[in-house]
Amino acid sequence: TELILADLQSVEKAVPRLTKESRLQKEKVAVLAAVEEAQKILESGQTLFAAGITAGTEKGKLLHELHLLTVKPFLYVFNVDEDELVDEDFKNEQRALVAPA
């Protein structure tokens, strides 16, 4: 949730600037629309990556200038004993811990 809040703060700061720029530069209209959509997703408590917006998508490219954290995929690392790695129940528990909501 901290990453979502950080991105939300970045987006909220960018909206007034992009609104002003979009009046002068028509190419910023698409960026503003993508930022407003990202704001709605973040306000719902979901990461942009979980919502399908990644760096490779069209919206992800439009949002690139903001360097949002939740656009990037997450990597989870568990420090476990080798014996625990063969236990399927344990692995399923770990998967459930990091599964998107």
Image (spheres, helix red, strand yellow):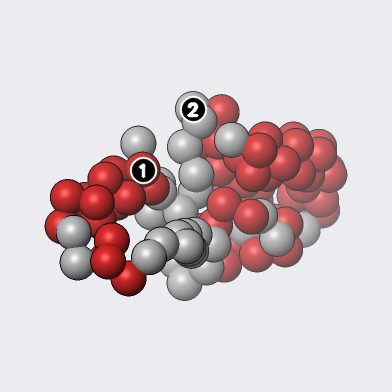
Q: Residues within 10 Å of mark 2 (few under 14, many from 20)?
A: few
Q: Does 86 sit above or below residue 23? A: below
The amino acid pointed to by label 1 is: Leu
**Looking at the picture, how far across and down is residue 68, in whole percent?**
66, 55
Q: Around disc 1, counting alpha carbons within 10 Å, would you say few (fewer than 14), some (14 to 19), or many (20 or more)?
A: few
Kind of residue at badge 2? Ser
Percent x, y of residue 36: 60, 39
Measured as percent of width and height from the top left, residue 61 is found at 57, 67
- Nearest to N terminus: mark 1 or mark 2: 2
- The residue lying at 50 percent from left, 44 percent from top is 47
Q: Tag 2, which secondary structure? A: loop
Q: Are marks 1 and 2 in contact (CB under 8 Å)?
A: no
Judged from the image, the secondary structure of the residue bearing numbered disc 1 is helix
Identify the disc placed on residue 44: 2
Report the number of discs: 2
In the picture provided, is 101 more to the left or to the right than 13?
A: left
Q: Quick check: 39 left or right of 16? A: left
Q: Is residue 60 visible?
A: no
Image quarter of the N terminus:
top right
Q: Nearer the viewer, mark 1 or mark 2?
A: 1
Locate residue 45 relative to residue 11 in the image: left or right. Answer: left
**Which disc number belongs to residue 57?**
none
Front residue of 77/16: it is 77
Mark 1 — residue? 97
Query: Which residue occupies the extreme top position in the image?
Result: 44
Residue 101 in view of the camera: yes
Q: Choose between 58 and 78: the one closer to the eye.
A: 78
Q: CA distance from mark 1 to mark 2?
A: 20 Å
Image quarter where the C terminus lies is top left
